[in-house]
Amino acid sequence: MNTMRRWIVAFFVGLADFLVGDDWFLAAGVVVVLGVAAIVGTLIASWWVLIVGVPTVLWISLRRATR
Amino acid sequence: MHSVILVLATFGASLVEMVEALTIVLAVGITKGWKTAFTATAAALAILLVIIVGFGPLISKLPLPVLRLIIGTLLLVFGLQWLRKAILRASGWKAQHDEAQIFDTEVAALGGTRPSTRIDRDGFIVAFKGVLLEGLEVAFIVVTFGATQHQVGLAALGAAAAVVVVLVIGLIVHRPLANVPENSLKMGVGVMLTSFGIFWAGEGVGAQWPGSDGALLAIIALVIVVTAALIARLRRTAPVAA
């Protein structure tokens, strides 16, 4: 049972690592930008949130890598 | 037009990853024998095919808005990772991928036994893992990118074409493909994945793009400009000349 649990945990840790990649900030930043776009979209046009937000997330991630 | 971009993106992604896998397969072939290398490669490619054939149609069945949000988000995260790595390499903040050096390291690590006509267990594991892990990203891109356009087959065709090209060239030259502009390809694929990710994830959260599908071209142009600007900016403070 313990071996099975270890395998399941290892699978999900591996999957998360595969999806998140080198910098967790990128994945978190994308989720935040999309969340903001969804909220803004209930009031006004929200496409510009992605146009501004995604390059900003990339820039911050690069700054973190080159500090 | 979307179909051309789809094939180009999956071809480019597959080419980059398969060039890296080829380095490992060649190292195994030379040190442990070609039977081991080919068997491991075939086994890993078969698993990748099962993943594409199994998950592609399954994901395609999701309702379009849900599909675009989930896949758009994943493509965006993946694309930004590729772009980030390519920008760091192009600006001199990260060392370029050196296939010749990786090949030498692999050969040294695998050395010690003579090539055999029997399947070597250690060599099999190394080659199998190499092809599977490098190919997993490609399978993921084929499934996600293809599913949003309901063209998983076409996406898989682009990826398969790259596998064939790399295998044939690899068999002819018998050494790592060190001259392939891996970083430029990685950057191109990163731009495509990020652009499509922005477009589809945006639609998924209810954003209405000005110009509808035509907005995609503007997004691609924007991502290219941002990438070039970030490389130029980071080059000024890079520790090594790019």
Image (cartoon, coloured by chain):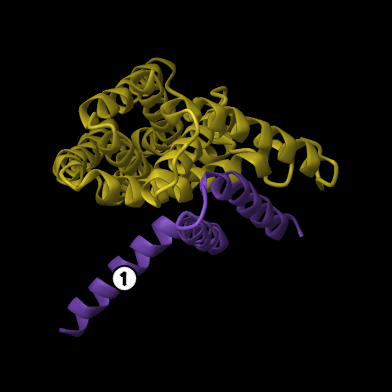
Chain colours: A purple, B yellow
Q: Is residue B182 visible?
A: no
**Quadrant assignment, res A29:** bottom right
Identify the residue position indicated by label 1 in the image: A10
Direction top: furthest residue: B172
Q: Residue B44: give x, y in percent of width and height.
A: 24, 42
Q: Is residue A55 left or right of residue B54?
A: right
> Three-letter amino acid code at disc 1?
Ala
Q: Quadrant of the N terminus of chain B?
A: top left
Q: Is residue B146 visible?
A: yes
Q: Residue A59: give x, y in percent of width and height.
A: 68, 51
What residue is at 54 percent from the left and 48 percent from the top? Answer: A50
Q: Which chain's residue wears label 1? A: A
Q: Is residue B224 left or right of residue B201?
A: right
Q: Residue B180: give x, y in percent of width and height.
A: 54, 23
Q: Is residue B47 left or right of residue B196?
A: left
What residue is at 15 percent from the left and 40 percent from the top? Answer: B57
Q: Quadrant of the C terminus of chain B?
A: top right
